[in-house]
Image (cartoon, rainbow, N blue to C red):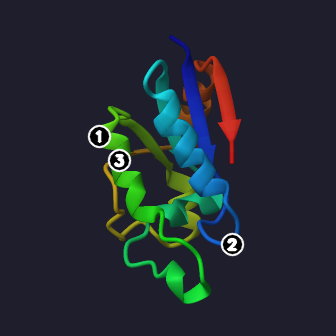
């Protein structure tokens, strides 16, 4: 079993990176230990009340709730990304742990594979 970190750092709508990251996390969770990290603009994936249909995009954000069903409990959000985007007082839409930059770096160093989207 490999330890795989999936970093989501891009905005949620406009391309397929977030959806691809989610697909890989769910598929790989059957035989690997998966950690999902939301950093930089990736934290916007966790905001409630998004309406991607208004820009003709598919609403995959609710699918992040499947992480818990697939036993992916290691979901982390970068504290500095939340701070710099004024999102510290917003309820995010999935269970997560907030980590500071040194803790995130330490977590990434312990992984066998790191994928960035």
Outermost residue on the top side: it is 1
Q: Nearer the viewer, residue 46 or 54?
A: 54
- Residue 82 visible in image: yes
Image location of residue 53, percent across then percent down: 51, 83
Q: Residue at x 60, y 85 (%)?
A: 55
Outermost residue on the bottom side: it is 54
Query: Judging from the image, what secondary structure is the residue with disc 2 in?
Result: loop
- Reply above or below: 112 against 57: above
Horizontal relation, residue 69 to residue 5: left or right? left
Query: Judging from the image, what secondary structure is the residue with disc 3 in?
Result: helix
- Residue 96 visible in image: no
Q: Residue at x 34, y 52 (%)?
A: 65
Q: Residues within 10 Å of mark 3 (few under 14, many from 20)?
A: few
Q: Nearer the viewer, residue 116 or 78?
A: 116
Image location of residue 25, percent across then percent down: 51, 37
Q: Residue at x 62, y 32 (%)?
A: 105
Name the residue carrying label 3.
66
Name the residue carrying label 1.
69
Quadrant housing residue 93: bottom left
Marks 3 and 2 sit apart, C-alpha to C-alpha, by 22 Å
Query: Judging from the image, what secondary structure is the residue with disc 1 in?
Result: helix
Q: Residues within 10 Å of mark 1 (few under 14, many from 20)?
A: few
Horizontal relation, residue 92 to residue 101: left or right? left
Name the residue carrying label 2.
14
Marks 1 and 3 sit apart, C-alpha to C-alpha, by 5 Å
**Which numbered disc covers residue 10?**
none
Whether residues under marks 1 and 3 lie with C-beta atoms below 8 angstroms apart, the answer is yes
Horizontal relation, residue 7 to residue 34: left or right? right
Q: Which is nearer the N-term, disc 3 or disc 2?
A: 2
Q: Residue at x 59, y 58 (%)?
A: 42
Q: Which is nearer the N-term, disc 1 or disc 2?
A: 2
Image location of residue 90, percent across then percent down: 36, 70
């Amino acid at each position: 079993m490999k330890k795989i970190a999936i970093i989501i750092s891009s905005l949620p709508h406009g391309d397929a990176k977030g959806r691809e990251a989610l697909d890989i996390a769910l598929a790989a969770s059957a035989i690997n230990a998966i950690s999902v990290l939301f950093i930089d603009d990736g934290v916007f994936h966790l905001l409630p009340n998004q309406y991607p249909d208004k820009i003709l995009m598919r609403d995959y954000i609710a699918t992040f709730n499947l992480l818990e069903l697939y036993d992916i409990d290691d979901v982390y959000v970068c504290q500095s990304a939340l701070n710099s985007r004024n999102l510290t007082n917003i309820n995010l839409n999935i269970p997560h742990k907030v980590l500071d930059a040194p803790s995130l770096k330490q977590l990434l160093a312990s992984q066998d594979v790191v994928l960035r989207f």
